[in-house]
């Protein structure tokens, strides 16, 4: 991107006047150059992106127009102003709601090159209504490191937990996508903290095909991890059993969480059976 303007240039014409520590004449030149950068070029660049977004679409060609990398003064000031001026402009594309242009301030930024599952995670979240924007790594890092003063939302395990928390259902995505999100949402938590930080996350895979919500051990419905024989005998309460046919790594993680007793997942035992015994006998037998 080349910039041409009526700048006050230095004597060797290789730079422009800039700095707050100049004398009166130099200071006037510096202020003029800064005004050009902040009040003319930065908003003009925003208009440029709004103009070409429909021509190029969310392609590498479009995102290559955005300034990335490191910049010397005063051009770093210009870049900061550009990112600040576009924060509320619909210059980013998200597949949410069938595809729409949204502002950086309204988006959840996602680095699609971060891991092998980044694309699948993004697609699942979009189906659930999260306005995810997939960005090239260089542009994603630019937003994270920008000194524009704008706080951008990023796809992380914590932000996904907050987005999903309290949802009554995630049935719009398939079972494998739910399991992928469960694994993702737990990856930054130690087992002891799952009940507290994954509270109301509706991603626990149950034996009856539904999903339960995580909570602290003393709150909500308890769900049980059983061996094969117990699974066979407890089909009457399949809505309380963790599905044993999920990927081994996820089942192992849930078992580890159950063993520390910090969440509403338990390893089934005789005491639990006695508490649930009334569910296994005919109602007419009560008090007989």
Image: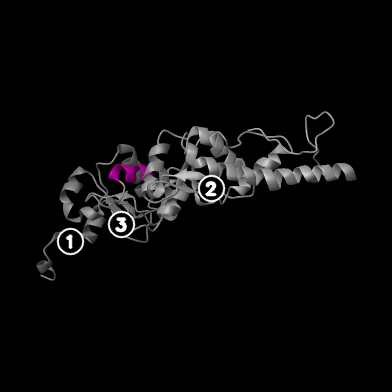
Q: Using the numbered discs, state the Cα–Cα distance from disc 1 to disc 3 in whole angstroms.
A: 15 Å
- SS state under label 2: helix
Give neighbour class at mark 2: few <14, some 14-19, many 20+ (Cα, 10 Å).
many
- Number of numbered callouts drawn: 3
**Which quarter of the figure has residue 239?**
bottom left
Q: Is residue 38 visible?
A: yes
**Which quarter of the figure has residue 162?**
bottom left
Is residue 70 located in the magenta-colored stretch of the structure? no
> Which residue does the numbered mark 2 point to in the structure image?
104
Q: Is residue 198 visible?
A: no
Q: Position of residue 179 (x, y in %)?
A: 33, 44
The residue under the point 62% across, 42% down is 45
- The residue at the far bottom in this view is 287
Q: Which mark is residue 279?
A: 1
Left or right: 175, with 103 as reference point: left
Q: Mark 1 touching mark 2, by CB under 8 A?
A: no
Closer to the chain start, of discs 1 and 3, is 3
Q: Identify the image quadrant of the C terminus.
A: bottom left
Task: Out of 193 and 157, give the one closest to the viewer.
Answer: 157
Task: Out of 215 and 70, give the one closest to the viewer.
Answer: 70
Task: Out of 208 and 119, give the one closest to the viewer.
Answer: 119
Which stretch did the figure color magenta?
Answer: 174-183
Closer to the chain start, of discs 2 and 3, is 2
Closer to the chain start, of discs 1 and 2, is 2
Q: Identify the image quadrant of the N terminus.
A: top right
The residue under the point 31% across, 59% down is 221
């Amino acid at each position: 991107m080349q910039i041409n303007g009526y700048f006050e240039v230095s004597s060797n014409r290789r730079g422009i006047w800039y700095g707050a520590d100049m004398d009166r004449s130099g200071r006037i030149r510096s202020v003029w150059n800064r005004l050009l950068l902040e009040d003319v070029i930065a908003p003009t660049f925003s208009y440029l992106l709004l103009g070409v977004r429909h021509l190029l679409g969310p392609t590498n060609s479009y995102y290559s127009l955005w300034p990335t990398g490191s910049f010397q003064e005063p051009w770093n000031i210009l870049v900061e102003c550009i990112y600040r001026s576009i924060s509320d402009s619909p210059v980013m594309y998200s597949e949410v709601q069938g595809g729409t242009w949204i502002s950086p301030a309204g988006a959840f930024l996602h680095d699609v090159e971060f891991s092998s599952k980044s694309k699948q995670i993004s697609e699942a979240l979009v189906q659930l209504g999260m306005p995810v924007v997939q960005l090239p790594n260089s542009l994603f890092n630019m937003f994270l490191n920008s000194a524009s003063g704008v706080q951008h939302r990023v796809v992380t395990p914590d932000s996904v937990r907050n987005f999903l928390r309290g949802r009554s259902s995630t049935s719009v995505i398939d079972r494998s996508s739910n399991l992928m999100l469960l694994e993702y949402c737990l990856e930054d938590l130690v087992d002891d903290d799952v009940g507290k930080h994954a509270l109301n996350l509706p991603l626990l895979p149950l034996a009856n095909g539904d999903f339960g919500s995580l909570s602290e051990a003393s709150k909500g419905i308890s769900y049980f991890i059983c061996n094969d024989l117990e699974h066979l005998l407890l089909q009457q309460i399949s809505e309380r059993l963790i599905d044993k046919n999920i990927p081994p790594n996820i089942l192992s993680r849930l078992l580890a969480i159950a063993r520390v007793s910090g969440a509403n997942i338990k390893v089934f035992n005789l005491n639990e059976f006695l508490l649930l015994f009334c569910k296994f006998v005919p109602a007419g037998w009560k008090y007989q």
